[in-house]
């Protein structure tokens, strides 16, 4: 869940601040403009609240914690650490993002929050008003409910909403930069993919086609990234993680979609990352805990073809080299490769299935998951 909320905030931070300051324009005029640009009717007035900087930051941070409790932050912190993404805490990342934002529509209370200084730019406010209109016409609270069942599906839904708003307002994502975690979360915001899908749908079927995507939402980030998958409503292949592997217990598990795979590889500069992720068919990531409290993350993926899984096998070797510098490779059949560094890493491919594990006993956990497939 922390990943999801951090992505929500990062998506807002990444929007470009083009245009005149919003304070110079009547708010009702901006709402009408948002309606004109998006094609969504105004159902009701959007309540607004202008807050001083520190109070705005605190309010936005509380909103992120509301949807992202500490128990879930702890799980994601452990998962990100095992994937080599954690140069600093997720809590500090959320706080940093809250300070950078200037305008945000909160669907939980259905109110537009504005930072008094520095003032939000016109395009940014229009963007958030479009999100408010999407909420009025399609109910954004559904995304929070989706997140309970399927994180990848919730991320896809959020991305098409943000992409629709960006298409109307003209804002765009900032260049991907910063730490590994910051790059990963920026890529995971899905703004560019959502905007591209919204543009394609509007081109092919006009406002009705785009409205259908907001009414039904893409079911996976694969559907978000590939319009043919969305139009076919192609579902993810099922992936199951066993609740126990020897003495290790599965403490948490989430879907791991195509956007996750792509963002992870891109965050570490792996060549051909997009192509390597495109054969995704289904995936889950889980956190296994030993009786002594040790943790190991495992990623199980199903691919469309054997060739797709082979592309992943090549990509994961480059990822390990970038994520775990100094790791020493050694043989560990039936897996394709194992590495030892500050912690152990293991990876294997069998047919169209792949498994990656990072942490103590990673070879045992990965081999068990691979064979049980």
Image (cartoon, rainbow, N blue to C red):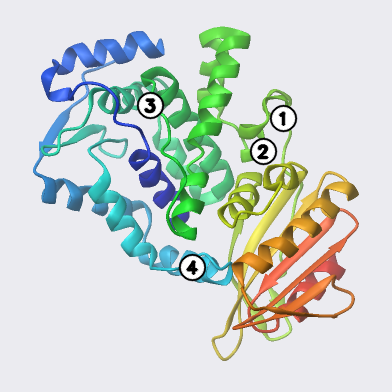
N-terminal label among 3 and 2: 3
Whether pointer 3 and pointer 2 mark residues with C-beta atoms closer than 8 Å, the reply is no
Mark 4: secondary structure = helix
Q: How far, Cα to Cα, is label 3 from label 2?
A: 24 Å
Residue 276: mark: none
Whether pointer 4 and pointer 1 mark residues with C-beta atoms closer than 8 Å, the reply is no
Q: Position of residue 296 (x, y in %)?
A: 62, 76
N-terminal label among 4 and 1: 4
Mark 3: secondary structure = loop
Q: How far, Cα to Cα, is label 1 from label 3?
A: 26 Å
Nearer to us in this view, 320 or 221: 320
Whether pointer 4 and pointer 3 mark residues with C-beta atoms closer than 8 Å, the reply is no
Residue 42 is left or right of residue 352, and the answer is left
Q: How far, Cα to Cα, is label 4 from label 1?
A: 31 Å
Residue 229: mark: 1
Nearer to us in this view, 353 or 151: 353
Mark 3 or mark 2, whichever is nearer to me: 3
Q: Position of residue 216 (x, y in %)?
A: 56, 27
Residue 124 is left or right of residue 14, and the answer is left
Mark 2: secondary structure = helix
Whether pointer 2 and pointer 1 mark residues with C-beta atoms closer than 8 Å, the reply is yes
N-terminal label among 4 and 2: 4
Nearer to us in this view, 278 or 300: 278
Residue wearing tag 3:
171
Whether pointer 1 and pointer 3 mark residues with C-beta atoms closer than 8 Å, the reply is no
Residue wearing tag 4:
75
Q: Is residue 97 visible?
A: yes
Q: How far, Cα to Cα, is label 2 from label 1?
A: 7 Å
Residue wearing tag 2:
222
Q: Position of residue 246 (x, y in %)?
A: 74, 84
């Amino acid at each position: 869940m922390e990943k999801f909320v951090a992505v929500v905030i990062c998506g807002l931070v990444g929007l470009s601040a083009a245009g005149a300051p919003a304070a110079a324009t009547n708010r009702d005029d901006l709402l009408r403009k948002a309606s004109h640009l998006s094609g969504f009717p105004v159902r009701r007035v959007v309540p607004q609240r202008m807050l001083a900087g520190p109070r705005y930051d605190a309010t936005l941070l509380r909103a992120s914690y509301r949807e992202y409790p500490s128990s879930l932050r702890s799980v994601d912190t452990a998962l990100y650490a095992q994937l080599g993404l954690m140069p600093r805490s997720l809590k500090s990342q959320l706080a940093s993002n809250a300070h950078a934002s200037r305008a945000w529509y909160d669907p939980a209370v259905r109110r537009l929050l504005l930072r008094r200084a520095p003032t939000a730019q016109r395009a940014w406010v229009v963007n958030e008003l479009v999100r408010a209109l999407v909420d009025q016409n399609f109910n954004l609270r559904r995304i929070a409910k989706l997140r309970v069942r399927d994180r990848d599906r919730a991320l896809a839904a959020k991305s098409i909403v943000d992409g629709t708003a960006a298409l109307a307002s003209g804002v765009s994502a900032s260049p991907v930069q910063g730490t590994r975690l910051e790059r990963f979360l920026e890529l995971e915001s899905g703004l560019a993919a959502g905007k591209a899908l919204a543009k394609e749908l509007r081109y092919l079927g006009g406002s009705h086609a785009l409205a259908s995507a907001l009414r039904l939402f893409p079911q996976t980030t694969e559907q978000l990234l590939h319009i043919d998958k969305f139009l076919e409503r192609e579902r993810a292949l099922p992936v199951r993680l066993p609740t126990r592997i020897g003495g290790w217990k599965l403490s948490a598990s989430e879907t791991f979609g195509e956007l996750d795979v792509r963002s992870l590889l891109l965050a570490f500069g792996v060549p051909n990352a997009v192509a390597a992720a495109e054969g995704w068919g289904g995936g889950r990531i889980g956190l296994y805990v030993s009786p002594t409290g040790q943790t190991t993350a495992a990623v199980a993926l199903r691919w469309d073809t054997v060739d797709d899984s082979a592309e992943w096998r090549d990509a994961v070797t480059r990822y390990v080299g970038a994520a775990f510098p100094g790791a020493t490779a050694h043989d560990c059949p039936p897996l394709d490769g194992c590495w030892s560094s500050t912690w152990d890493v293991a990876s294997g491919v069998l047919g169209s299935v792949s498994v990656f594990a990072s942490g103590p006993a990673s070879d045992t956990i990965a081999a068990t998951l691979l064979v049980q497939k």
